[in-house]
Image: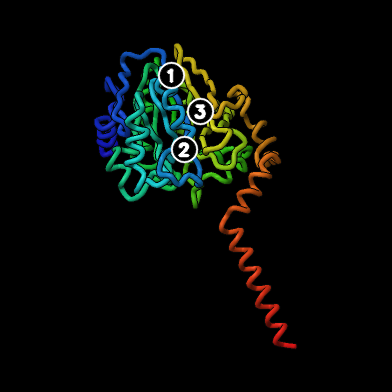
Amino acid sequence: MMYFFKIFLILSVFGIKAQSVTSGLNHKSINSDSLQNYSFIVSGHFYGGSSNLTGFPVNTILAHLDWVNESNSTMLMSLGDIFMDVKNDIPNYETCFFQKLNIPLFNAVGNHDISSNIYQSNFGETFFYFQISNDIHIVLDTEINDGSIKDEQMIILNEVYELVKSNLDIKNVFVYTHRTIWARSYPELDLLFTTNTQSVFGNNYTKEVLPILALIQSKAQVHVFSGSLGDAPASFFNFKSDDGINYIATAIRGLKRDAVLIVSSRDSKIGFNVKSLTNQGLNKFESYDLEFWTANIGKKKGYNYRLIPLKIKNSILSIEFWSGILIVLTVFSVFKIGRKFMR
């Protein structure tokens, strides 16, 4: 009885059959009933990297807000770590990011997004799902149980399975997480994401989550997106497992490689395109696969020797350089005076 009550509660809160879906971040809505073919933009880590101490989103995403608004995308899906410091950054994000977006913004929270109950108080629930055309979109919280999917989130996955089992029109199920909680379920991926946020004691993906997704996969194509991407040779990774599930990791970090993924659903067929945020040339999305990552991960980029004069100039003009000179001269003078008195 309690199980069915929880399902009713989830449905009443998240409303899979609702005519519109509203973002808790920027309050824009998707009128899902009016859509047949659509596209959306997806990426993670919108605060960039640890060097971004501005309290604003990374420059590469801010520089492309006009492009996002003019892209005719149905939504922008963030894969977590939208903030670097959620306690202090919300006002900046409200004025320069959320309010300037003309399309709904959704977020699968990451570790930087969660602090006490701040995110939930401002933006609402951290896990939910909704339907657009013949596709279901599930946003999960991989922080609440250190990477494991439990309780109400498991109810959501079971409910989606019941939906796809009873509704043959549903063709795709998209699952969004921050952490790559799926990587250790496949031995060939185990060493690819070592610099990503990991569960301290492991998670329940292999034993509990994957079996449900496999059941869903037997009825509709499952695409799992994650946005924790640390040391990476590209902004994209894709891998199709033997059980047919399509795994994707994508994020920006305030680097030359920054790029976002554009997903299109046309007559329920899914297509992927890539967009560089730094005007770099990109390969087709499908090429950023296991073979590409295995060949390129951990490789250092070539050093730009044209930067040597600038680095010398910056060093000479820095206070640290002259402080070091002063210390060396002082020590040398003290040593010289000491030797004079010792004679």
Residue type of the residue flagged with mark 2:
Val
In the displayed structure, 273 sits above or below 79; it is: above
Residue type of the residue flagged with mark 3:
Val
Q: Alpha carbon of mark 1 to alpha carbon of mark 3: how far?
A: 13 Å
Q: Nearer the viewer, mark 3 or mark 2?
A: 2
- Taking the spot 63% from the left edge, 25% from the top edge, the residue there is 287
Mark nearer the N terminus (3 vs 2): 2
Q: Which mark is residue 9?
A: none
Mark nearer the N terminus (1 vs 3): 1
Mark nearer the N terminus (2 vs 1): 2
In the displayed structure, 341 sits above or below 158; it is: below
Instruction: Look at the image and tell me whether residue 55 can be seen.
Output: yes
Residue 45, position as x, y percentages in the image: 47, 38
Q: Is residue 4 left or right of residue 224?
A: left
Residue 326, position as x, y percentages in the image: 61, 66
Q: Nearer the viewer, mark 2 or mark 1?
A: 2
For numbered disc 1, what is the local secondary structure? Answer: loop
Q: Alpha carbon of mark 3 to alpha carbon of mark 2: how far?
A: 13 Å
Quadrant (top left, top right, bottom left, bottom right) of the N terminus: top left
For numbered disc 3, what is the local secondary structure? Answer: strand
* Residue at image mark 1: 71
Crowding at mark 2 (Cα within 10 Å: few <14, some 14-19, many 20+): many
Quadrant (top left, top right, bottom left, bottom right) of the C terminus: bottom right
* Residue at image mark 3: 260
- Taking the spot 52% from the left edge, 38% from the top edge, the residue there is 254
Q: Alpha carbon of mark 2 to alpha carbon of mark 1: how far?
A: 20 Å
* Residue at image mark 2: 58
Q: Is residue 184 left or right of residue 28?
A: right
